[in-house]
């Protein structure tokens, strides 16, 4: 069974690169939906980078 985790973000550029590997290390069939609320700190760009790194496991929604 695949689990989708929705991650709402705002100014989480420092935390997001730590959170994603931690979630994937849980050994569950996870898919992530990262929702960025137009963060000025680069969170959206980091989310896009992570999505490119894990295209089958991460989707990004920019608001």
Image: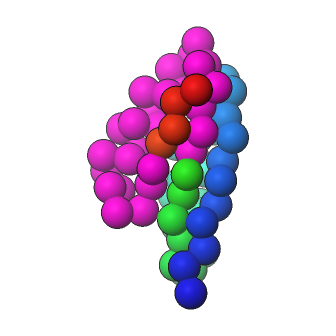
User: Can you give x and y, in whole percent of width and height, for residue 21 in the image?
Assistant: 51, 58
Decide: is 47 above or below 24.
above
Decide: is 23 above or below 50.
below
Residue drawn at x 39%, y 36% is 48
Most distant residue in the front direction: 63
Residue drawn at x 45%, y 50% is 59
Residue drawn at x 56%, y 45% is 34
Can see residue 14? no
Quarter of the image where one finds residue 2: bottom right
Residue drawn at x 64%, y 25% is 37
Most distant residue in the bottom direction: 1
Residue 25: in magenta span: no
Quadrant where the N terminus is found in the figure: bottom right
User: Can you give x and y, in whole percent of width and height, for residue 62 in the image?
Assistant: 52, 30
Quadrant where the C terminus is found in the figure: top right
- For the record, the magenta segment spans 34-59
Decide: is 9 above or below 59.
above
| 12 left or right of 52 in image | right
Residue 40: in magenta span: yes
| 35 left or right of 31 in image | right
Looking at the picture, tell me which residue is in the foreground, 59 or 19. Answer: 59
Colour option used: rainbow
Quarter of the image where one finds residue 36: top right
């Amino acid at each position: 069974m695949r689990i989708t985790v929705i991650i709402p973000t705002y100014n989480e550029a420092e935390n997001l690169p730590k959170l994603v590997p931690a979630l994937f290390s849980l050994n569950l069939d996870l898919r992530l939906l990262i929702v960025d609320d137009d963060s000025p700190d680069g969170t959206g760009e980091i989310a896009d980078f992570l999505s490119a790194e894990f295209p089958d496991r991460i989707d990004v929604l920019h608001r």
